[in-house]
Amino acid sequence: MNAYLNSIKIALISTIIALLIGYPIAYYIARSSESRRNMLLMLIILPFWTSFLLRVYAWIGFLKSNGLVNNFLLQTGLISQPLVMLQTDFAVYIGIVYNYLPFMILPLYANLVKLDSTLLEAASDLGARPIVTFFTVTLPLSFPGIIAGSMLVLIPAIGEFVIPSLLGGPDTLMIGRVLWDEFFPNRDWPVASALAIVMLVVFVIPIMILRKARGAQIEVH
Amino acid sequence: MPRNGYFLPIVAVLGYAFLYAPIISLIVYSFNESQLVTVWSGFSTKWYGKLLQDSQILQAAWLSLKIAFTSATLALCLGTLAALVLTRFGKFRIKSLLGGMVTAPLVMPEVITGLSLLLLFIAMESLFGWPKGRGITTLILAHTTFCMAFVAVVVQSRLVRMDESLEEAAQDLGATPLRVFTDVTLPVISPALVSGWLLAFTLSLDDLVISSFVSGPGSTTLPMVIFSKIRLGLNPEVNALATIIISIVALAVFVGGWRAFSVDKKRNAVGAQTE
């Protein structure tokens, strides 16, 4: 039970972080000129085509106690002791946000690029400051994109196995990893199957939300 | 258009740096002489030489390529069929259920897909005696299953945007349904077929979790070898391997992107002329 709650907690927090990072990037790409847009999009998709496993591996080199981040901080004198970052929940958050960021950016971009810019002009003509325009016009209109992107990150993140097992510590309980351990080292197939079924039930809600968001998006266009 | 100020460009630059810094560090340290991956001691290509002599990695890579090629091709056929049914057969009773079932593997956590496929294969073996044991056959079947979903989605989105009057015109001119498909539909959706196949190929090549469930002794794929190596810590050979994979992918994406871009340009030029 703990593993389920913990998975959902980690996945939710990672999704929110990914949204906070992904939204401005998607917005920036959508507002760029058309020729730059293709280039910027290609750069978002490129890491997605390279191996998932190797992208997780890259973070081990970054986060470990004599890794690149610690070396840099030690040399600049910002810290005197290496920080423990690998094998913590922190590393799992970074891993999930890093690997699933394109899934957040692409639906958001698809939504934002279709945003009618006359609406923004109308708002600013009527005297709204950019920040007000953003919160009253852009944000509500991009809601389907936010939902689609968040679900695309949230659902696979809950069942993630590779990231917690490589970046997380022994106490980072995530359901995908528990299932793996029951199945492979413990060879307890019935328990593993039961875990999978419960996980499926947990997923019904976000998958329904995702389908609804997609349907809404199609209707809008 | 309201002014963006400095906030957006800065966030975008940081975002791209976040995406690319780990990848660049992987590449840089693959040329490091030291066994300690993160401590720079001098330029060397010796890990590439080591990699080329590592028969375990080479065998696994060859197996992975074979599996990826076969399952991407099978997934392309089946996924295209699924997409055709979902877009061209009008509204039928179980359409939304079928659509949901085709796209479910896209978001389904791999541990669930892997476990259920394994249980299915075992049940099939005890019922019909096929597939015998676990190995290449089960790996291909499993990869085809989850790649099919991706192909179906890619092809479906192209079919939806396609102008159906082209097909109707061909039919009016007396073409049989088969000829309409081979002479009209297929050429129009061919870019989607190519990208669907490539997507399936890379996904199959990259899959660790599902493969681990359905593989048997003697059929270890490349991601499984990499996973068992990096579980023990950093490994400069893996960095070298990563650099090779990343270069191939980057090259393919840039060539593909550039080609798509120049086709777009041509199309726009033609469009401008006819207008």
Image (cartoon, helix red, strand yellow):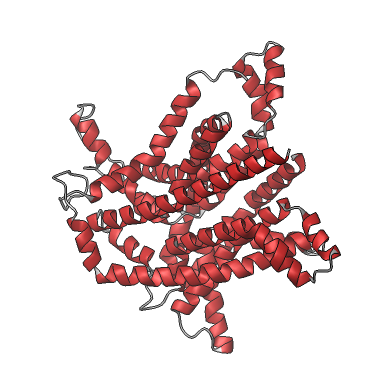
**Residue situated in front as seen by the camera: A11 or B234:** B234
The location of residue A221, given as percent across then percent down, is 74, 40
The image position of residue B36, as x and y in percent, is 18, 50
* Along the viewing direction, whichever of B45 and A148 lies nearer the viewer: B45
Q: Is residue A13 left or right of residue B64?
A: right
Farthest bottom residue in view: B129
Residue A80: x percent and y percent? 19, 30
Q: Nearer the viewer, residue B158 or B141?
A: B158
Residue furthest front in the image: B273
Does residue A111 show up? yes
Q: In which quarter of the image is residue A161?
A: bottom left
Q: Where does the image place residue B159, in percent across and percent down from the top left? A: 70, 56
Residue at the (21%, 27%) spot, across then down? A76
Kindly indicate the quadrant of the structure image that contains residue A32: top right
What is the total number of numbered labels drawn onto the structure image?
0
Q: For this view, does B165 lie left or right of residue B70? A: right
Q: Is residue B215 left or right of residue A197?
A: left
Q: In this view, does B74 lie above or below B83?
A: below
Instruction: Report the residue that reaches farthest toward the right.
Output: B172
At 54% across and 45% down in the image, what residue appears? Answer: B262
